[in-house]
Amino acid sequence: MPNLKIAFAVALIALALASCEEPSAPPTMTGTPLPAQATIPSAAVLRQLYADKTWFWADGGGYFDPTGGFHAATGTGDKTNYATGFWWTTDQGALCFDATWHSKKTAAGSAITCFDHRRDGNVWYQRKEPGPWYVFKSDPVKPEDEFEKLKPGNQIEALLQKARTTLGMPSS
């Protein structure tokens, strides 16, 4: 029975953290068929794409430190969340981050989020695991592409510090 209690506790924590995980696939871009000839980008190519960039989301964003650190902040007021952790890429085309999310409503807990990537020429596809594929970067790039939400440098630090203050956590 102890294993059942642990499994139940893990399930409850996962359920509580599900509301904190960011980002999610843009709803207007879901369900794009993946071309049969699409290739898998290498870990090095993905690392170059995300390193030292802030990915802006609907209500915040995440920063991919070039040394492997990951920092994110979302929401305001009672919906404020922030996360710290690390990120990595794989030769299977995945960008992943393992972050401990903090919010007023749930206890801090680690959550791993991964995004798969594929390329067809200059067009990039992405999906949050598990989930449908969508165009991440068009050719030519369109303003609504998720790729356009990647901006150089750490542009999330002020929001991260504000989230920590809102949640009564010390700055680091």
Image: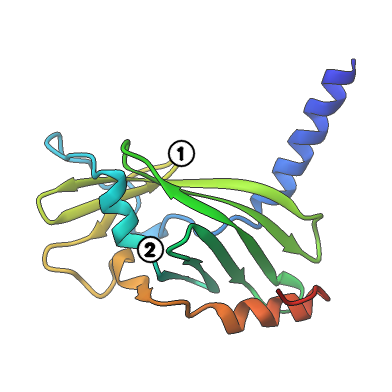
For badge 2, the amino acid type reads Ala
Q: Residue at x 58, y 67 (%)?
A: 72
26 shown above or below 55: above
Return the residue nearer the eye: 5 or 64: 64
User: At which x and y percent is residue 130?
Assistant: 46, 38
Return the residue nearer the eye: 169 or 20: 169
32 shown above or below 85: above
37 shown above or below 45: above
79 relative to 68 in the view: left or right: right
121 relative to 26 in the view: left or right: left
72 relative to 147 in the view: left or right: right
29 relative to 40 in the view: left or right: right
Q: Earlier in the sequence, mark 2 or mark 1?
A: 2
User: At which x and y percent is residue 135?
Assistant: 26, 55
Mark 2 or 1, which is nearer the eye? Answer: 2
Q: Residues within 10 Å of mark 2 (few under 14, many from 20)?
A: some
Q: Which residue is mark 2?
A: 51
Q: Is residue 159 visible?
A: yes
As drawn, the label of residue 130 is: 1
Q: Residue at x 77, y 79 (%)?
A: 166
Element under disc 2: loop
Q: Residue at x 83, y 27 (%)?
A: 6
Structural distance between the alpha carbons of marks 2 and 1: 23 Å
Q: Residue at x 76, y 35 (%)?
A: 10
Q: Is residue 134 visible?
A: no
